[in-house]
Image (spheres, rainbow, N blue to C red):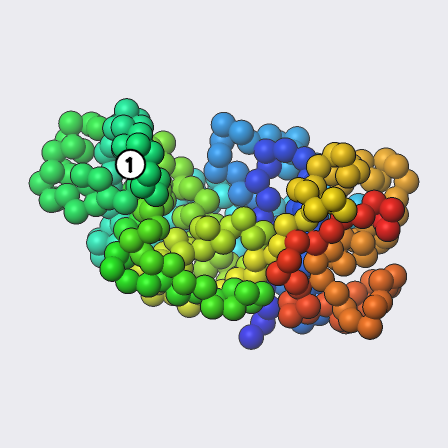
């Protein structure tokens, strides 16, 4: 299997240390296996999109020594590499239509007021919050057609299978399970026609031939939704690798009190690119034999997903 990985940031802010670690892990893994490293810009949240942020990502990653084989700034056979452009090119439409036709997705016409009433009811009754069907999951074609004829806005949701166990495998934690009845039906296409992360990221991973998805463990809660989407489309899933969070030496979530979090701040302070890459690679991953200071070639030749730990990785500015 030819390894293909992607680093897929959302250009809404600055590139921080946690995101750099994902980029480093992807780069090392691709280089170790002679694979392809892709930069994909996930910019479907147009209200928060910042072109300066995207430009900084490219500049920062280049400074940090991360090279890409495909991406918006280098081209490639799987373009375009910005999701907004992929949406305009109609690349997502056939797959969404297939899900609707097969009954694995549905149009939901709930108003914001109705959704808030649902959430309030769930809170009052101490129920898990989330959308699990409402009036539209199993609505008749006639009811849906009438709502469309009346011009009511709608979103398209994935129909999570109920009465079954959703099973997935994480390369770090092994087998994971969720009861389908506890997983909410995620929005795939928003009312404005833009795909959500759940749709665009997973559809792109398939269309771009991604073999390994390396992302943060905060995405584990979304994992069953992505498993259900791949299953609904009959696609083979990539290997998913959910990396642990980064904490400070006090065990708390990394913040500015532990040191700079914006990568370019380290450049301004005089840190060397490879020193930072070496340090970041060792947050939550260990090559064995108590090695720490490593050349670029040593990092590439020893990096393995199996060495990533499930426990939080510590950021120690003194060690850096």
Q: Is residue 136 left or right of residue 216?
A: left
Q: Quadrant of the N terminus?
A: bottom right
Residue 279 vertical placement versus 123 (above, below): below
Q: Residue at x 45, y 50 (%)?
A: 222
Q: Which of the 4 image quarters holds residue 17?
A: top right
- Rendered image quadrant of residue 54: top right
x then y, percent, for residue 216: 58, 51
Tell me: 192 left or right of 67.
left
x and y percent of residue 221 in the render? 46, 50
Residue found at the very far right of the displayed protein: 270
Residue drawn at (23%, 34%) of the image? 109
Residue at far top of view: 113
Residue at horizontal 74%, vertical 44%?
A: 250
Q: Residues within 10 Å of mark 1 (few under 14, many from 20)?
A: few
Q: Circle 1 is placed at which residue position?
A: 125
> Whole-percent x and y of residue 303?
72, 67
Q: Please state if 203 lies on the left or on the right of 41 as rendered.
A: left
- How many numbered discs sit on the rendered protein? 1
Which secondary structure, mark 1? loop
Q: For the view shown, which residue lies furthest in the left direction?
A: 142
Report the front residue among 111 and 234. Answer: 111
Task: Determine if residue 89 is in view.
Answer: no
Q: Is residue 202 above or below residue 265?
A: below
Residue 29, visible in the rendered structure: yes
Which residue shows up at 9% across the image and 40% down it?
142
Residue 14: x and y in percent read 67, 35
Q: Is residue 270 above or below residue 183?
A: above
């Amino acid at each position: 299997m030819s390894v293909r990985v992607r680093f897929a940031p959302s250009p809404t802010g600055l590139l921080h240390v946690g995101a750099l670690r994902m980029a480093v892990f992807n780069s090392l893994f691709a280089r170790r296996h002679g694979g392809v490293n892709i930069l994909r810009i996930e910019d479907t949240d147009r209200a928060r999109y910042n072109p300066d942020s995207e430009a900084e990502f490219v500049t920062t990653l280049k400074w940090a020594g991360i090279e890409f084989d495909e991406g918006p700034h280098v081209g490639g056979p799987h373009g375009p590499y910005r999701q907004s452009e992929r949406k305009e090119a109609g690349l997502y439409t056939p797959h969404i239509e297939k899900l609707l036709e097969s009954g694995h997705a549905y149009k939901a016409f709930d108003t914001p007021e109705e959704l808030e009433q649902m959430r309030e009811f769930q809170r009052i009754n101490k129920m898990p919050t989330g959308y699990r069907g409402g009036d539209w999951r199993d609505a008749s074609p006639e009811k849906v057609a009438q709502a469309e004829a009346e011009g009511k806005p709608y979103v398209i949701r994935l129909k999570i299978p109920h009465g079954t166990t959703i099973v997935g495998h994480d390369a770090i934690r092994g087998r994971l399970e969720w009861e389908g009845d506890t997983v909410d039906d995620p929005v795939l296409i928003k009312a404005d026609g833009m795909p959500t992360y759940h749709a665009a990221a997973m559809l792109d991973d398939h269309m771009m031939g991604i073999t390994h998805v390396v992302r943060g463990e905060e995405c584990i809660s979304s994992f069953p939704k992505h498993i259900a989407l791949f299953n609904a489309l009959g696609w083979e899933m990539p290997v998913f690798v959910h990396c642990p969070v980064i904490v400070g030496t006090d065990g708390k979530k990394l913040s500015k009190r532990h040191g700079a979090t914006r990568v370019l701040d380290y450049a301004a302070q005089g840190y060397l690119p490879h020193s930072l890459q070496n340090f970041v690679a060792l947050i939550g991953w260990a090559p064995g034999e108590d090695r720490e200071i490593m050349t670029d070639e040593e990092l590439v030749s020893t990096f393995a997903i199996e060495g990533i730990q499930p426990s939080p990785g510590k950021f120690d500015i003194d060690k850096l």
